[in-house]
């Protein structure tokens, strides 16, 4: 990952955007605050990874606590709704 100053990012925005298409770019301000600039494709990959992580965590919680799975919950709710007809 390339690290550049905020001043360079301001003065060479087109170049920085081009760099971010292939690799994330860290933009660091004088106070040390840093922002990461990345392409939409890279962002979508991170989003998918986050979704996968939280789905796996949810499965772990269900397994650890012997809770009802989503499928079983839907089936039970459907059974209850059908019983009222």
Image (cartoon, rainbow, N blue to C red):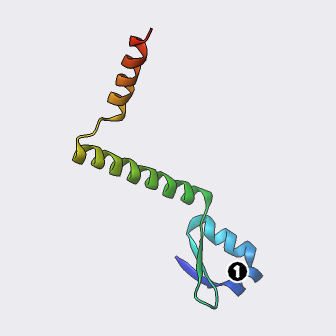
Question: What percent of the width, then of the height, locates residue 17?
Answer: 68, 70
**Image-quadrant location for residue 26:** bottom right
- Against 39, residue 9 (above or below) is below
Q: For the image shown, how many numbered marks are present on the structure?
A: 1
**Image-quadrant location for residue 30:** bottom right
Question: What percent of the width, then of the height, locates residue 77?
Answer: 39, 24
The residue singled out by tag 1 in the image is 9
User: Closer to the camera, 37 or 53?
Assistant: 53
User: Closer to the camera, 68 or 20?
Assistant: 68
User: Closer to the camera, 14 or 69?
Assistant: 69
- Against 74, residue 61 (above or below) is below
Question: What percent of the width, then of the height, locates residue 23?
Answer: 55, 69
Crowding near the residue tagged with mark 1, few <14, some 14–19, many ≥20 C-alpha atoms within 10 Å: some
User: Closer to the camera, 19 or 75?
Assistant: 75
Q: Which residue lies furthest to the right in this view?
A: 11
Q: Residue at x 36, y 30 (%)?
A: 73
Question: What percent of the width, then of the height, locates residue 65?
Answer: 24, 45
Q: Which residue is drawn at 71% across and 75% down?
A: 15
Q: Which residue lies furthest to the bottom in this view?
A: 30
Q: Residue furthest top?
A: 85
**80 to the left or right of 65:** right
**56 to the left or right of 41:** left
Q: Is mark 1 on a helix, strand or loop?
A: helix
Q: Residue at x 28, y 49 (%)?
A: 60
- Against 70, residue 13 (above or below) is below
- In the rendered image, the quadrant that contains the C terminus is top left
């Amino acid at each position: 990952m390339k690290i550049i100053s905020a001043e360079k990012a301001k003065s060479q925005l087109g170049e920085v955007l081009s760099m971010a298409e292939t690799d994330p770019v860290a933009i660091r301000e004088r106070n040390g605050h840093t922002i990461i600039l990345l392409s939409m494709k890279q962002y979508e990959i991170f989003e998918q990874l986050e979704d996968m992580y939280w789905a796996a965590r949810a499965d772990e919680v269900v397994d650890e606590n012997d809770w009802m799975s989503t499928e079983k919950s839907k089936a039970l709710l459907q059974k209850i709704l059908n019983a009222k007809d």
